[in-house]
Image (cartoon, rainbow, N blue to C red):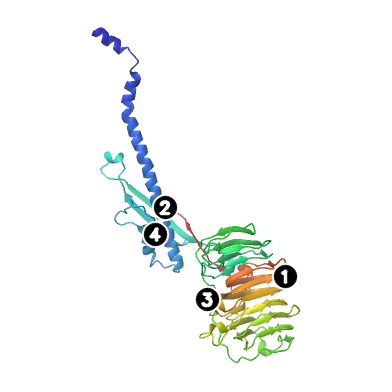
Amino acid sequence: MLKFLRKLAVNKRGNALLIAAGAMPMIVGCAGLASDTIQWSLWKRQLQRAADSAAMAGVYDRVNSSGSTSTVASTVAHDLTLNQHTWMSNLTGYPIISYPADAGVITNQVRVSLAVQKSLPFSSMFMTAAPTIIANSTAAGIPGGEYCVVSLEPLASKTGITIGGNANIDMDCGMISNSPATNSALSNGTSSRVKATVIAAVGGVQASNSWTVDQYNPYSPPIVDPYANVPVPTPTGCTAFPNTRNLNFTNDPNHAIGKTVCYNSDMQIQGNVVLGPATYILDAASLKMTSTGASLSCNGCTIILTSSTAATNPSSIGTISVSGGLLNLSPSTTGTYKGIALYQDRRALDSAGKNIINGNSGSIIQGVLYFPSQQLTYNGDGTTSALCTQFVTRRIIFSGSNTTSNKYARGSDCPILPGAIGGGSLVRLVA
């Protein structure tokens, strides 16, 4: 027996088995901790994703409520109901919602903190309490850009901005569409080209080789009507528009700065018409120009389309129909309608008409083209220019049979405009 034991003691064939047996607790422990770590990381990621979504939902709520926080808590709770996994049961006192102060261009901040306790398979055998998993997220609104083309279209069934034909749009500003459609802004022209700083939309932006932009911002918050507070005048003392072909009101004291002129018949431009720097009201009347040899120009005027019966008969509000001729318009630089060249009563019915401006080569339109409730089609042949111009419409279509150049200078560089149009702020995670 002793001889056998001495022989067994010097035998090395069982060492590996002994080492493996001795290391087995460590191997099992490492495997258990690895499994727990992976599970903890997954739970942490899922909780963080829920916090991120809730914080962004809170910011959207603040943006749509002009910064108010009164309904943020209910919005966050609703979002967590949709996005928290079934295993997530917040600790008492959570979620914690706070509102960090604005920091420069970062506004409407919302911070959401979530915390849960969840037992882990292996470590729970050695821990008296489940570990606490905490996720913090801060979201905020940041500026989306400066816009000179604004579509206020609210319906998902409509495209807000359409680039067609051979239009060549060259702008040093952006475009934004409120339409939630998947193709809220699109280019469907065979040879159309668009150059802009940003293309933003509440819905999607159709991919196209025609777009040359610095930034795409689909699924942005809607932009508010920048001129919603500009009042509609009440037509008084209206007369019929003169039936002569050629008119020049620049030296007429009744058409001077600060004066208001009202017409209750169509402003039919058949020859060369020069308006004075007054405010022109068309009461249930339209602006029309069809002759390629006609021209309409003014320096410092505003043309307003409204109707004295708009409250009961909004379809009586006139439209713009310029299918030929030369336009050279610049707006008033003072008064209620400062910077607005063409203004259509916002009570106009979308179904009652559409507006079209076909400018010949050499046409120049400055200021705001404001058609908040109807579509504007802006066509041109040759080199139609839109200098220091803002297009604020329900829908807008840019088109042209040849090459149309619509050039805009930023609002900060154009004192002729009421101001720059910012908005469409982006909701982003900032911490």
Closer to us: mark 4 or mark 1? 1
Closer to us: mark 1 or mark 2? 1
Residue type at the position of mark 1: Asp
Q: Which residue is mark 2?
A: 49
For marks 2 and 4, give the CA distance.
11 Å
Residue at (31, 25) in percent of width and height: 22
Residue type at the position of mark 4: Asp
Q: Are marks 1 and 2 in contact (CB under 8 Å)?
A: no
Is the residue marked by circle 1 packed among few (<14), some (14-19), or many (20+) residues within 10 Å?
many
For marks 1 and 3, give the CA distance.
32 Å
Mark nearer the N terminus (2 vs 4): 2
Q: Residue furthest top?
A: 3
Position of residue 419 measured from the top left corner of the image (x, y, whole percent): 58, 71
Residue 79 badge? 4
For marks 2 and 3, give the CA distance.
38 Å
Position of residue 375 measured from the top left corner of the image (x, y, whole percent): 59, 73
